[in-house]
Image (tube, rainbow, N blue to C red):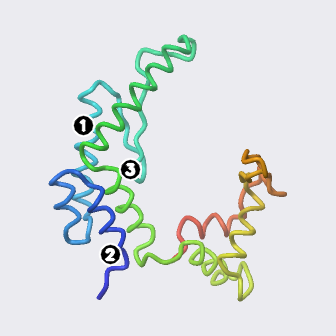
Amino acid sequence: MRNPFAAEFAQARNEVTTETGRKILEDDVISATEYQQVEDASVQCMRDQGLVVKVEDEGAVTTELVGLTEHSPQEELDAMNAQIDAVHRECRAKFDMGPISLLYWELRRNPENVDFNQAIADCMVRGGHRDEGYDKEAYSQELARYAITLKAAADGTEYEVEGDLSGQELPPEMAACQQDPHD
């Protein structure tokens, strides 16, 4: 049976730079234990460089600006943010977190590697929220009504275009299907 993520694994194998990263990807599977191993190493690297790091859902990390407050001078805040960004990039690269994390979470969200927009549209039809024939194009058009998108002007500049429902919450059935389109 062909792995639906074979191409993505091949690409990730080209992007990783460590032996650990290559070993994790060699069997076209990223186990929770393997993912946790590189996440823990990356987070520890950040902590070893003085960052206060908290791991959030789906691999996101947040850091605290220790010693600074909202009253700190902007140049100090900017310098601290630049330092945090540099440490994040260094530690994530050192343990191949970029390609491994991206693929790990995509495998969990979309195990069959289906067209995600079509899966969301199918979920909304299955749930009785949209009529038969509602497809990824209809979903994309509906979603655009809630968004602010960038358009290119003739002179090459970009400008924002607000959908007619911009700023409003997505309908609950759309939000639920975005969260888990296979449900």
Question: How far apart, in angstroms, are the residues tagged by discs 1 and 2?
Answer: 30 Å
Q: Is residue 117 above or below residue 78?
A: below
Please say if the residues under marks 1 and 3 sit with CB atoms less than 8 Å apart: no
Q: SS for tag 2? A: helix
Question: How far apart, in angstroms, are the residues tagged by discs 2 and 3?
Answer: 22 Å
Residue 6 locus on image (x, y percent): 32, 75
Q: SS for tag 3? A: helix
The residue that mark 2 highlights is 6
Residue 46 locus on image (x, y percent): 29, 33
| Residue found at x 22% / y 43% | 41
Q: Is residue 58 above or below residue 123?
A: above
Residue 23 lies left or right of residue 97; in this view the side is: left
| Residue found at x 75% / y 58% | 146
Please say if the residues under marks 2 and 3 sit with CB atoms less than 8 Å apart: no
Closer to viewer: mark 2 or mark 3 = 2
Residue with the most extreme right position: 164
Please say if the residues under marks 1 and 2 sit with CB atoms less than 8 Å apart: no
Q: Which mark is residue 59?
A: 3
| Residue found at x 24% / y 50% | 38
Circle 1: is it few (<14), some (14-19), or many (20+) Cα within 10 Å?
Answer: some
Task: Say what amino acid the circle numbered 3 marks.
Answer: Gly
